[in-house]
Amino acid sequence: MPSDLYCPDCGTEYAAGPDEPWRCTCGHALEFVARPHPEGNPLPLSRLDTSEGLWTFFEFLPIEKHVTFHEGFTPLVDAPEWDAQFKLEYVFPTGSFKDRGATTTLSRAVELGVEKVIEDSSGNAGASIAAYAAKAGIEADIYVPADVKQSKLMAIQRVGARPVRVEGSREDVTAACLEAVGDGEGWYASHAWNPAFFAGTMTFAFEIAAQRNWTVPDAVVLPIGHGTLFLGAYRGFKLLLDAGIVDRMPRLLGGQAAGYAPIVAALGGETTDADGERTDIADGIQIAEPARGTQILEAIEDTDGDAIALGSNVLETTLDTLHRHGYYVEPTCAAAPAALRRYREAGVIDEDDDVVVPLTGSGLKTM
């Protein structure tokens, strides 16, 4: 049976079904009702059957159906120029880490008997949800900014989904999408609100631990927009810690786009670049109001983490450096490596700290 939902803020429970709410009546995000997780020592990577990709960790995932391209177990490679390891999340089927959440979200949609999904996105999540909806045989409407990159628009259209272009800000796109959801036009497959999406992104942490012989790094530096990968990492490492598989949590450190840095603001940091400008690149993290902002702040506090804002100059310089070292990634991808360098310069990360950084989206998506 599909897992029921509950609100961790007010305690209200909701039965699973195609008409389940996308958030609690009190306004907070919903989560899956807790269930037991596996116990005992995990197999070493050399003996672990990873042929099912991230679904290798099905025992941790509250979803029975599998709408999958066998995605996951992206490479974890040494990046000596950054004194770190890069997790190459841009090699997923649709070219971004959003496939982690799309496979679990569309799997739940199939479990619930959903006939049509609706999502709002700056591009990557929409393309991912559209592709997995096609795999599942489910209709999809994807609400995107009117100026969405052509490559991402075509990725949505070519798999049979319907892009709905909305004039105005990223917040206007969400508002238009929520109006359609409120009118009953489909099930909200939101990468920001739907708990099934976060069930997928937490496999990022499982893979890192498995690829490192079930140890965790000192720190993980990630981009923060809606925080889907940031919170997924937190939840995944926390589950491993609670299960006794790892013995500590890594510090979680974030990078936000200057001018779109509400988490940095909440922490009392500087939210624009040196010229007081908003960044005009890194569109994937230009989020003014993260749906789960409170949870992101709690994850930062719990892991002794932090968040900083990054301007256009440092992002462009970092992107060029990534390209010159063979990592063909999109601009938003530069946020985490740029943040890593800033954290090292500030002494937040020590020279001998062991650090993992995800590269989140392919440069092919910006053509």
Image (tube, helix red, strand yellow):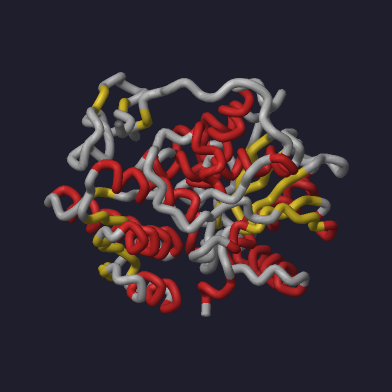
Q: Nearer the viewer, residue 307 or 117?
A: 117
In the picture as drawn, the residue positioned furthest to the right comes out as 352
Q: Nearer the viewer, residue 296 or 228?
A: 228
Q: Nearer the viewer, residue 237 or 168?
A: 237
Vertical order, 87 against 127 (above or below): above
Q: Name the residue rendered at 45%, 62% in the picture.
A: 124
Vertical order, 222 against 280 (above or below): above
Q: Name the residue rendered at 36%, 25% in the picture.
A: 33
Q: Is residue 115 left or right of residue 209?
A: left
Q: Give the percent coordinates (x, y) of residue 275.
A: 60, 62
Q: Quadrant of residue 301?
A: top right
Q: Quadrant of residue 154?
A: bottom left
In the rendered image, the quadrant that contains the N terminus is: top left
Q: Name the residue rendered at 36%, 47% in the picture.
A: 107
Q: Give the percent coordinates (x, y) of residue 48.
A: 67, 41
Q: Is residue 37 visible?
A: yes
Vertical order, 290 against 248 (above or below): below
Q: Give the percent coordinates (x, y) of residue 365.
A: 51, 72
Total marks in image: 0
Q: Give the percent coordinates (x, y) of residue 264.
A: 55, 43
Q: Is residue 157 left or right of residue 81?
A: left
Q: Is residue 290 visible?
A: no
Q: Is residue 213 left or right of residue 244?
A: right
Q: Name the residue rendered at 74%, 38% in the picture.
A: 217
Q: Is residue 139 left or right of residue 245?
A: left
